[in-house]
Image (tube, grey):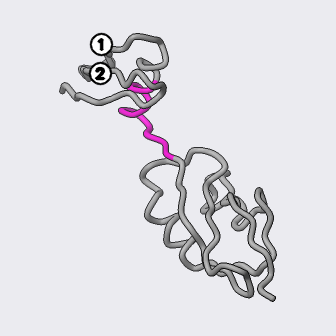
Amino acid sequence: MIKNMTCINCPLGCQLEVEVDGEIKVSGNKCKRGEEYAKNEITNPLRIITTTVKVEGGDRPLLSVKTDKEIPKSKIFDIMKEINKVKTKAPVEIGDIVIENVLGTGANIVATSKIQRAD
């Protein structure tokens, strides 16, 4: 099987061709990171989630959040269901943990913005 993809590890955006035939062969990469990216993308794709959660009593109704590490791509929808259940209370500081160890992935959902109490 041959798969074409664009490397996202650096601004070059190399067009990679990945051949999977027992072993994984990568071509088109200009650096080692491209090869590593392609192999990971084929065997165990990982992603960072960025989204929002609802805020109670804040100066804004939504808080931007993200995972503090990459999570398996296959768990994105399940993790989003968990995130969508959350309603946090103001005040919130950048870096505050909103959900700890979401779905046992070892990743925390953390605040990426500050929310103050509504006056």
User: Does residue 117 sit above or below 21 in this rendering?
Assistant: below
Occupied quadrant, residue 91 = bottom right
Q: Spatial distance from mark 2 to mark 1, Cα to Cα? A: 6 Å
Residue 82: give x, y in percent of width and height: 56, 72
Tell me the chief SS of the magenta region. Answer: helix
- Crowding at dot 1, Cα within 10 Å, few <14 / some 14-19 / many 20+, comes out as some
* Residue furthest to the front: 119
Q: How far across and down, in percent of the image, does residue 5 sit?
A: 28, 30
What range of the chain is rendered magenta?
A: 37-47
Q: What residue is disc 2 on?
A: 16
Above or below, comparing residue 38 to residue 116 in the picture: above
From the viewer's perspective, tell me whether residue 52 is left or right of residue 119.
left
User: Label 1's element?
Assistant: strand
Q: Does the stretch in magenta take in 116? A: no
Q: Is residue 12 left or right of residue 61?
A: left
Instruction: Place residue 104 in its image quadrant.
Output: bottom right
Q: Is 35 placed left or right of 99 in the picture?
A: left
Question: Which badge, 2 or 1, comes first in the chain's sequence?
Answer: 2
**Residue at x-position 37% and y-position 25%:** 13
Please state which amino acid type lies under the numbered disc 1.
Ser
59 or 26, which is in the foreground?
59
Q: Residue 6 at x, y = what percent?
A: 32, 29
Residue at 30% from the left image edge and 14% from the top image edge: 28
Q: How many marks?
A: 2
Reading the image, the residue beneath label 1 is 27
Q: Are marks 2 and 1 in contact (CB under 8 Å)?
A: yes
The quadrant the N terminus occupies is top left
